[in-house]
Amino acid sequence: MTTPAFIQVDGLEKTFPAPMGQEPVTVFQNLDFEIEKGEFVCLIGHSGCGKSTILNILAGLDAATDGYVFMENRQVTGPGLDRGVVFQGHALMPWLTVRENVAFAVKSRFKRHSKDEVNAQVEKYVEMVGLSHAIDKKPHQLSGGMRQRVGIARAFAIEPKMLLMDEPFGALDALTRGVIQDELLAICQATEQTVFMITHDVDEAILLADKILLMTNGPFAEVAECAYNPLKKPRSRQEMHHDEHYYPFRNHLMDFLVNGPSTPYADKASDGTPPAMEEAPRSGPRRVVNA
Ligand SMILES: Nc1ncnc2c1ncn2[C@@H]1O[C@H](COP(=O)(O)OP(=O)(O)O)[C@@H](O)[C@H]1O
Ligand SMILES: [Mg+2]
């Protein structure tokens, strides 16, 4: 018997009840995928295919209509402090400082920690995202990028078994996004954090992910392909476009988003081209030349 994956998603489906006078909507169905411990998995797909709903089900904040999520062989049935979530908006408490926001999460997770232990944990993770200088500021005194960093520090500070991130950098400008991507990459590499992240940004997925789940459009969306990232690790934003696999892989992901599913990347040649079609068997009598 093979050992089950760290996260096992089996036959997941979500159908929302019908609004008055309309049919119920099955947003996605038959989702099967796995996440190994320490793996960084990205999910890409167009708006409305159900990505956030999937993340919420993994977080235990929403329930599937059918199918199961198992984490370390136990079914996920509700939220838990073994999973840290970073939402698209920062979701910080506006009346608390950075220190207090992160401390709130740390205290709920580590109930027996002394005040000093909580504070040490908070400072460690706030420093990790480069915000020590702003630790006693309130969210409204911070830029969008800084707020999103606090959200990341808060999620890491509870030392979750799995980090779930829903387009965490979607609202940031490209420059800030790049800097935080680098920070996240460094933190994840150092901590071997297991991550499930939704993104719209193909380059972000190529930089960060070990594997990328490609979702078709809803309704009845499915995971059409699980593409393993062929680029060597460690990767960096500055260097990755020099990797021979970068353009073929990027083209594959872009083609998926623009044209829909095609030959899975793993079945293409090393330069990303689809395998040559075998010549179709001829039907009917052969044409005899020079007979
Ligand atoms: N609570 C809800 N009730 C009814 N429909 C919903 C609800 N939440 C999401 N949906 C619908 O489910 C689909 C998927 O939503 P979502 O998971 O947010 O997609 P994505 O994150 O991929 O953009 C959308 O069409 C959305 O309108
Ligand atoms: Mg979404």
Image: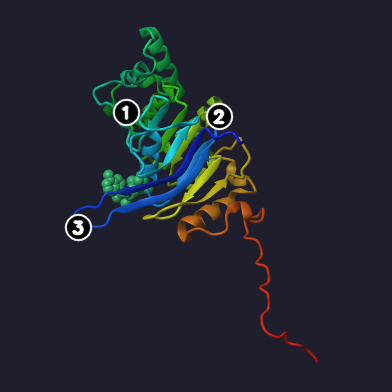
Q: Which residue is situated farthest in the front direction here?
A: 1
Q: In the image, is the residue at mark 2 within 8 Å of ligand 2 by its beta carbon?
A: no
Observer able to see residue 222: yes
Q: Nearer the viewer, mark 2 or mark 1?
A: 2
Position of residue 61 relative to residue 250, above or below, is above
Kind of element beneath mark 2? helix
- Per the rendering, the mark at residue 189 is 2
Residue placed under numbered mark 3 in the picture: 21
Residue placed under numbered mark 1 in the picture: 142
Residue at 50 percent across and 43 percent down: it is 33
* Disc 1 residue type (three-letter): Leu
Observer able to see residue 168: no
Q: Position of residue 195 (x, y in %)?
A: 48, 34
Using a 10 Å C-alpha cutoff, classify the residue at mark 2 as few (fewer than 14 neighbours), some (14 to 19) or many (20 or more): some
Q: In the image, is the residue at mark 3 within 8 Å of ligand 1 by its beta carbon?
A: no
Judge by depth and name the residue closer to the eye, 268 or 70.
70
Q: Is residue 98 found left or right of 286 in the rendered image?
A: left
Q: Position of residue 191 (x, y in %)?
A: 53, 25
